[in-house]
């Protein structure tokens, strides 16, 4: 029974580690996409930092990426940037790859 308990604990620990890592990578992606959008809107460096943080926080509104996409689309459109849903989704994919690469380089 002890061997089984040890295996179960190992799987639980791996699951928790993987979930934590995915959370950190997604938060990094959201920060990067916030910086991307801030650049398109012509924000100052201070405004960029604040805006990127607001994008990270927007991801806590609901599960999935729709809350982030909705925020980015609304903010970019309001700022007069010609962007659509597909462009934002493509940028999210690119920034996810970049966020993963950054985590791999840190390890």
Image (cartoon, helix red, strand yellow):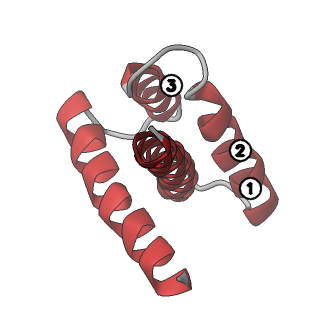
Q: Position of residue 95 (x, y in %)?
A: 37, 59
Residue density around tag 1, few if under 14, some if 14–19, many if 20 or more, within 10 Å: some
Who's the residue at 50% across and 44% down the image?
A: 2
Residue density around tag 2, few if under 14, some if 14–19, many if 20 or more, within 10 Å: some
> Left or right of 43: which side holds 12?
left
In this view, the residue in front, 57 or 78, is: 57
Image quadrant containing the N terminus: top left
Asked if residue 38 shows in the view, the reply is: no
Q: What separation in Å lies between label 3 and label 2 (alpha carbons)?
A: 12 Å
Looking at the rendered structure, the number of numbered marks drawn on it comes to: 3
Who's the residue at 69% across and 36% down the image?
A: 54
**Residues marked 3 and 2 touching at CB (< 8 Å):** no
Who's the residue at 24% across and 29% down the image?
A: 85
11 is higher (above) or lower (below) than 29 = above
Determine the secondary structure under disc 1.
helix
**Residues marked 1 and 3 touching at CB (< 8 Å):** no
Q: Position of residue 13 (x, y in %)?
A: 53, 48
Give the mark toward the camera: 3 or 2: 2
Closer to the chain start, of discs 1 and 3, is 1
Q: What separation in Å lies between label 2 and label 1 (alpha carbons)?
A: 6 Å
Who's the residue at 47% across and 20% down the image?
A: 67
In this view, the residue in front, 40 or 3, is: 3
**Residues marked 2 and 1 touching at CB (< 8 Å):** yes
Q: Position of residue 21 (x, y in %)?
A: 51, 54
Q: Which residue is mark 3?
A: 71
Determine the secondary structure under disc 3.
helix
In this view, the residue in front, 66 or 22, is: 22
Q: Position of residue 78 (x, y in %)?
A: 51, 26
Q: Which residue is mark 2?
A: 53
Q: Which residue is mark 1?
A: 49
């Amino acid at each position: 029974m002890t061997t089984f308990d040890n295996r179960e604990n190992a799987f639980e620990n791996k699951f928790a580690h993987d979930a934590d890592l995915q959370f950190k990578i997604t938060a990094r992606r959201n920060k990067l996409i916030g910086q991307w959008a801030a650049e398109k809107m012509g924000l100052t460096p201070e405004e960029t930092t604040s805006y990127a943080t607001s994008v990270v926080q927007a991801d806590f509104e609901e599960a999935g990426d729709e809350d982030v996409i909705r925020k980015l689309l609304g903010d970019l459109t309001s700022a007069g940037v010609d962007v659509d849903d597909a462009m934002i989704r493509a940028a999210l994919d690119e920034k996810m790859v970049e966020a993963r690469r950054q985590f791999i380089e840190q390890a």
